[in-house]
Amino acid sequence: MSASSRTSANSWQSERRLNLKTVIHSCSVLVFLLIGQSSTFAWWNHGHRHITEGAIEYLPYPLKGFFQSQAADLIFMSGQEPPGAHYIDIDVYPEFFAGTFPRDLDVLVGIYGAPYVTSVGKGPWTFVDYVETLTAAMAAASSQQDWIDLISLAAAQAHYIEDLHNPLHLTYNYNGQYTGNTGIHARYEGEMIFRHLDELTFSETEAAYVPSMLDFVFDGIDSHYGFVEDILAADTMYTGPHDEAYYAGMWAETGEFTHDLFQQAAEAVAASWYTAWVNAGSPRTFLAYSADFEGDGDVDALDLDLWQTAYGIRSVADADVDADTDGADFLQWQRQFGSNFSTSSTLKVVPEPISRSLCFLALTLAGCWPRLK
């Protein structure tokens, strides 16, 4: 990062201090007026749900089967806004550009103080907290209903790591407000993605275990941050009416790396779920039947197919929990064939306190934009 970029980052902070009271006063009035309105559609949720749907396919059986059985609720809830700040203004820290950024939250707070660190976002650490909470919930779950109840946790966890794969969630200039690109956040993350969602396909892969979730997140931030300048440059290049020609141009300039970011986000979501499950001891208490190798709530021919594929090689079709797939597991499948456990999830929607689409319109008209990312 150039010296001029670091100087710009410092100027953002200075301008922030001068305008903070005015922005808070102006925006708080509008937010108050909008608080009571419910949101039926938010501009960013289609991207979140698309990534979450792709992530489910990367899980191993039987965890994959259970998540597939809860997919409708899981995907829907991942598009809802969980509490907290799903970002980090990493470029306000000089240590980030120097390569000495402390990933330990206590160390960072010791340098800058808790109020400042909180004000510029603690997304990475909140995400790690979600992974640890999900791990504990999986370890404690003793029934299918316990597992169904933790789906909302898995959805919020997914939302956080998906947001941290958006470069505009990594910068204080998140809406282009300091570079003449005001409104880029919604245009890039929402409108452009909506127009090209079908092109954001996912490659086949398998969820990987992550030894250090905190390093995993920050390594990703190091990789994704560079795209901030590319997004802003593309927006500047196609300045003018934000019409279909604008979005076509934006996609031409940013589509390739955006596709990569969606792929990486789906892999990260799956890895975080899988890692939580492994750290919990790989429990199978969500299975109503031990021969439900796919974890989808019944024992059928698909479970036999999985047993045949895994026989003598993998332990995914391990009905008697002896760490292998063999004839004894086939015997369990025969005895349980045809069994079916009907599950129904009680939907737990993470509340959205403000209608984003209405808030965006009102705040644009008012000339201010609160930190809602």
Image (tube, rainbow, N blue to C red):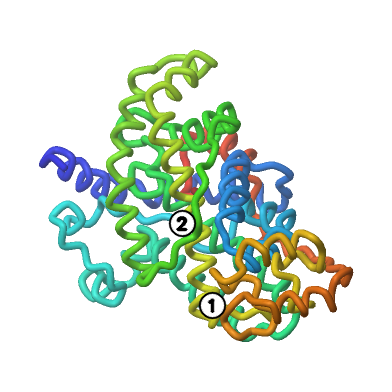
Please give left or right for residue 125 compared with residue 15 in the image.
right
Residue 112 pos. (x, y %): 24, 68
What residue type is disc 2 on? Ala
Residue 277 pos. (x, y %): 55, 74
Please give left or right for residue 341 compared with residue 229 in the image.
right
**Residue drawn at the location 45% of the way across and 36% of the way down:** 259
Circle 1 residue = 135
- Helix, strand or loop for disc 2: helix
Circle 2 residue = 268
* Quadrant location of the N terminus in the rendered image: top left
**Residue drawn at the location 67% of the way across and 62% of the way down:** 306
Residue 39 pos. (x, y %): 71, 47
Residue 253 found in image quarter: top left
Tell me which numbered mark, 1 or 2, is placed earlier along the sequence.
1
Residue 210 pos. (x, y %): 40, 67
**Residue drawn at the location 59% of the way across and 34% of the way down:** 361
Distance between the Cα atoms at labels 1 and 2? 16 Å
- The correct choice, above or below, for 133 with respect to 353 in the image is below
**Residue drawn at the location 49% of the way across and 65% of the way down:** 272
